[in-house]
């Protein structure tokens, strides 16, 4: 059984999507539609902008989404039997399984980016990567910090977990995690505490937009970040999408559940190969395209 997966923020690179635009009329039409929907030439930034330009909040998330979804439309050779996306990538997955239209998903991604930026301005936060320490130990140490917010944010693969919270909370946790035996506990160059309670203002802002958007019944199950379980109910998908902003990305569990449900081949659509690497570490015995 084939599973299609889609990356999240951080996979962007200068020149992304230009090859698709130049080689496919379908891609050109979709990129030009995106420029019209967003009200600025995101294609110009994607194709010609430098790394700093691509880090602009209004650009990064739509850019990764566009590259992922357009790659899917142009390059797919079959329909997915199950889908999943890492954080932002969940919106790409929803388009791939027919739960959201291209336009609706792009508008939501743009609103999501803006809402997250505003939440970052309300409360400064950060994230840190923790390597080579059991998830249970990371969870226990995060819970032990009572005077600050710090929580597990991304369960990427065994031995790789990202934590998120206030600057002081993450810094305290990093010291304790290293003392507990982590190979590394290093702050990431991000502008906010994504997938933590500090994103609550963004979740509240995005809720109305998500609930007022038409979601269709997907053509196959989507394994969502919040609980790593397959979902086909449109209303439940919406609820999980709102909760995603303040909840951890359970990528390890998603891949494990997909494999348990019959996935034996994974194909990643979008910039980079981050998910391929993570899937290989979660289970080296599955085929990865």
Image (cartoon, rainbow, N blue to C red):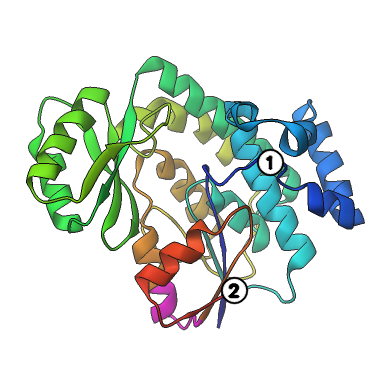
**Residue 127 falls in which quadrant of the image?**
top left
Position of the N terminus, as image quadrant, is bottom right
In the displayed structure image, the side of residue 107 where residue 222 appears, left or right: left
Residue 88 on image: x %, y %:
53, 46
Magenta region includes residue 261: yes
Q: Find the magenta span and give its range.
A: 257-264
221 to 19, vertically: above or below: below
Q: Badge 1 is on which residue?
A: 106
Residue 229 seen:
no
Crowd band around label 2 with a 10 angstrom C-alpha radius: few (<14), some (14–19), many (20+): few
Residue 15 on image: x %, y %:
72, 42
Magenta region includes residue 18: no
In the image shown, does 134 or 206 lie closer to the viewer?
Answer: 134
118 to 283, vertically: above or below: above
Label 2: which secondary element: loop
Crowd band around label 1 with a 10 angstrom C-alpha radius: few (<14), some (14–19), many (20+): many
Label 1: which secondary element: helix
Residue 4 on image: x %, y %:
59, 68
In the displayed structure image, the side of residue 9 where residue 103 appears, left or right: right
> Residue drawn 79% across and 46% down?
18
> Residue drawn 38% across and 51% down?
249
Residue 65 seen:
yes
Q: Earlier in the sequence, mark 2 or mark 1?
A: 1
> Residue drawn 78% across and 26% down?
40
Q: Nearer the viewer, mark 2 or mark 1?
A: 2
Q: Badge 2 is on which residue?
A: 289
């Amino acid at each position: 059984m084939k599973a299609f997966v889609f990356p999240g923020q951080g996979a962007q690179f200068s020149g992304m999507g230009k090859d698709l635009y130049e080689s496919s009329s379908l891609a050109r039409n979709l990129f030009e539609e995106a420029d019209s929907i967003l009200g600025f030439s995101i294609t110009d930034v994607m194709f010609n902008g430098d790394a700093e330009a691509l880090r602009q909040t209004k650009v990064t998330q739509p850019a990764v989404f566009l590259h992922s979804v357009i790659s899917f439309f142009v390059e797919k050779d079959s329909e997915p039997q199950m889908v999943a996306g890492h954080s932002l990538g969940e919106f790409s997955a929803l388009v791939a399984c027919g739960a959201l239209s291209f336009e609706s998903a792009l508008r939501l991604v743009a609103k999501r980016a803006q809402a997250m930026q505003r939440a970052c301005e309300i409360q400064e936060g950060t994230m840190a990567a923790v390597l080579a320490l059991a998830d249970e130990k990371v969870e226990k140490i995060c819970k032990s910090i009572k005077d600050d917010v710090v929580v597990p944010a991304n369960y990427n693969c065994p031995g790789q977990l990202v934590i998120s919270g206030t600057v002081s909370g993450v810094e305290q946790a990093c010291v304790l995690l290293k003392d507990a035996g982590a190979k590394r506990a290093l702050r990431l160059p991000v502008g906010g505490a994504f997938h933590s309670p500090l994103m609550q203002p963004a979740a509240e802002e995005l809720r109305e937009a998500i609930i007022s958007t038409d979601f269709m019944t997907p053509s196959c199950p989507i394994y969502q970040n919040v609980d790593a379980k397959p979902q086909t109910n449109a209303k439940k998908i919406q609820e999980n999408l709102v909760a995603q902003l303040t909840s951890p990305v359970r990528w390890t569990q998603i891949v494990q559940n997909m494999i348990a449900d019959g996935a034996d081949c994974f194909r990643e659509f979008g910039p980079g190969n981050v998910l391929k690497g993570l899937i290989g570490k979660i289970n080296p015995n599955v085929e990865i395209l």
